[in-house]
Image (cartoon, rainbow, N blue to C red):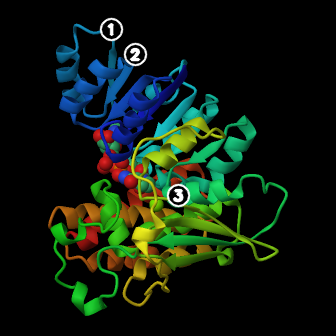
């Protein structure tokens, strides 16, 4: 049996991970963590029988303890609980499927405890990639990408360990507002932005996909995962989401991974790497697709991508500023407190206003996050 722990078991990636567990029969879920959805978490505990479960919310944890009193599961809470799940002795792989910078400390703890990381939580690499990647190397722990584009790149790199990459082609669907101009985005409502054309995902990443901030975060994620220069990463808008990304080698050969848009494939590949396992579901039918199309990203309208390149070029804590500002701005947009275009405006203002720092430590990254939140609270939510 393969033993895994999941951070964010009730979310989009978390539940799809459990779909794979259900299908494969040789994976044991030994520990899980979620934010506050104890109704679903209780069902998961009854079905998968983990030995440890964390509910971040303290009060909900107390409630869940009562509800699961008949089961041999330990219920913990808060960041301490998340850390306990991350380093649970029996698990071999940690699936990081929580949203945001909250994932940093659990990921670091898991690496130091020698766990393989199936990484969905891209915000961790964006903000702390310069610490995480060398740490994973030091502890001999693989970081296995779950993000579909990065999994596609990872799959396209297999067997080419000795060959030089000349370029990474990172595909993007373009989101629900592809083709629109800036003035047309002024009045976008939360419901409009939550409709992704190809993928069904959590709320934050769906908004990020519509602003192209998600692609910006993915450029930074790719840089850390594959050790390439920023200039070697080309974003290609490909509305059908069939080519999940590709690698161009020195001889001009381009190797890509294609498939239907189904996150279970990259999750399963990360869990079983380097093995491919059978999987149920639709197969890619090129005839019914007819054609695949490609466009340049519209960086005038979607500032999120340009700002991400700027943040990465400046380095240090600037990607953290970019990411933290986005996390807070998206939360404000989802709460109906700011307009749609304000999201990238807030990111840009924070990148200008918050003090830059070179080579930040973990503490300095978390400090930067707090500074960004305080700045937004004082000057933008006033
Ligand atoms: P989601 O919102 O659907 O799920 C988030 C999960 O995290 C839930 O289980 C929630 O309970 C849990 N959570 C939230 N706050 C928590 C807390 N304080 N403590 C413990 N758990 C907490 O999100 P998602 O779409 O599954 O995305 C998860 C991560 O994966 C993100 O970083 C996202 O960018 C990345 N990702 C997602 C997809 C996708 O298809 N959904 C694709 C690529 C990458
Ligand atoms: Mg992706």
Mark 2 near mark 1, Cβ–Cβ under 8 Å? Answer: yes
Q: Quadrant of the N terminus?
A: top right
Q: Where is residue 360 in the image (x, y as percent from the top left)?
A: 60, 57
Q: In which quarter of the image is residue 14?
A: top left
Q: Residue at x 38, y 34 (%)?
A: 18
**Which residue was labeled with disc 3?**
127
From mark 2 to mark 3, how far is it between C-alphas? 31 Å
Q: Vertical placement of 277 versus 240: above or below? A: above
- Give 305 or 280, whichever is nearer the viewer: 280
In screen coordinates, is 134 left or right of 314?
right
Left or right? Give the position of 186 relative to 304. Answer: left
Q: Residue at position x 53%, y 68% from top?
A: 318
**Residue named by callout 2:** 51
Residue placed at 56% from the left, 66% from the top?
245
Q: Position of residue 196 (x, y in %)?
A: 29, 66
Work out whether residue 223 or residue 127 is closer to the camera in this orientation and state it.
223
Disc number placed over residue 72 in the picture, else none? 1
Residue visible at 38% across and 29% down in the picture: 22
Dividing the picture into quarters, in which one does residue 315 lie? bottom right
Q: Among all residues in the image, which is located at the extreme front?
A: 287
Distance from disc 1 to disc 3, alpha carbons, whole Å, reads: 37 Å
Where does the image place residue 59, in percent across and percent down from the top left?
19, 28
Ligand 1 under 8 Å from disc 1 Cβ: no
Assess disc 1: are there few (<14), some (14-19) or many (≥20) residues with their C-alpha within 10 Å of its C-alpha.
few
| Dot 1 and dot 3 residues touching (CB under 8 Å) | no
Q: Which of marks 1 and 2 precedes in the sequence?
A: 2
Q: Comparing marks 1 and 3, which lies closer to the viewer? A: 1
Residue 247 visible in the current orientation: yes
Q: Judging from the image, what secondary structure is the residue with disc 2 in?
A: loop
Q: Earlier in the sequence, mark 2 or mark 3?
A: 2
Q: Could you say which disc has been placed on residue 243 in the image?
A: none
Assign a secondary structure to mark 1. Answer: loop
């Amino acid at each position: 049996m393969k033993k895994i722990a999941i951070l964010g078991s009730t979310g989009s990636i978390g539940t799809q991970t459990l779909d794979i567990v259900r299908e494969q029969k040789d994976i044991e879920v030994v520990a899980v963590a979620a934010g506050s959805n104890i109704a679903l978490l209780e069902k998961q505990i009854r079905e998968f029988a983990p030995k440890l479960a964390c509910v971040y919310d303290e009060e909900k944890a107390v409630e869940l303890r009562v509800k699961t009193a008949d089961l041999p599961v330990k219920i913990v809470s808060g960041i301490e609980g998340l850390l306990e799940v991350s380093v649970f002795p029996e698990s071999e792989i940690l699936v990081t499927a929580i949203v945001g910078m909250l994932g940093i400390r659990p990921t670091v703890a898991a690496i130091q405890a020698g766990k393989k990381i199936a990484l969905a939580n891209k915000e961790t690499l964006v903000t702390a990639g310069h610490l995480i990647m060398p740490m994973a190397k030091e502890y001999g722990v693989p970081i296995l990408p779950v993000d579909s584009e990065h999994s596609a790149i990872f799959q396209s790199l297999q067997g080419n360990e000795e060959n030089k990459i000349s370029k990474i082609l990172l595909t993007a669907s373009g989101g629900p507002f592809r083709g629109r101009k800036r003035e047309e985005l002024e009045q976008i409502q939360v419901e409009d932005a939550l409709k992704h054309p190809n993928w069904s995902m959590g709320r934050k990443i769906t908004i990020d996909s519509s602003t192209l901030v998600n692609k910006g975060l993915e450029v930074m994620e790719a840089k850390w995962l594959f050790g390439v220069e920023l200039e070697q990463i080309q974003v290609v808008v490909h509305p059908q989401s069939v080519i999940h990304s590709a690698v161009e080698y020195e001889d001009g050969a381009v190797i890509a991974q294609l498939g239907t848009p189904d996150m279970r494939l990259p999750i399963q590949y990360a869990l079983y790497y380097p093995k491919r396992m059978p999987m149920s579901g639709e197969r890619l039918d090129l005839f019914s697709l007819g054609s695949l199309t490609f466009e340049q990203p519209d960086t005038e309208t979607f500032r999120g991508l340009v700002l991400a390149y700027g943040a990465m070029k400046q380095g240090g804590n600037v990607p953290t500023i970019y990411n933290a500002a986005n996390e807070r701005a998206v939360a404000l947009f989802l709460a109906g407190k700011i307009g749609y275009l304000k999201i990238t405006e807030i990111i840009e203002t924070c990148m200008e206003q918050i003090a830059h720092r070179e080579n930040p430590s973990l503490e300095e990254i978390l400090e930067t996050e707090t500074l960004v939140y305080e700045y937004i609270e004082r000057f933008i939510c006033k």
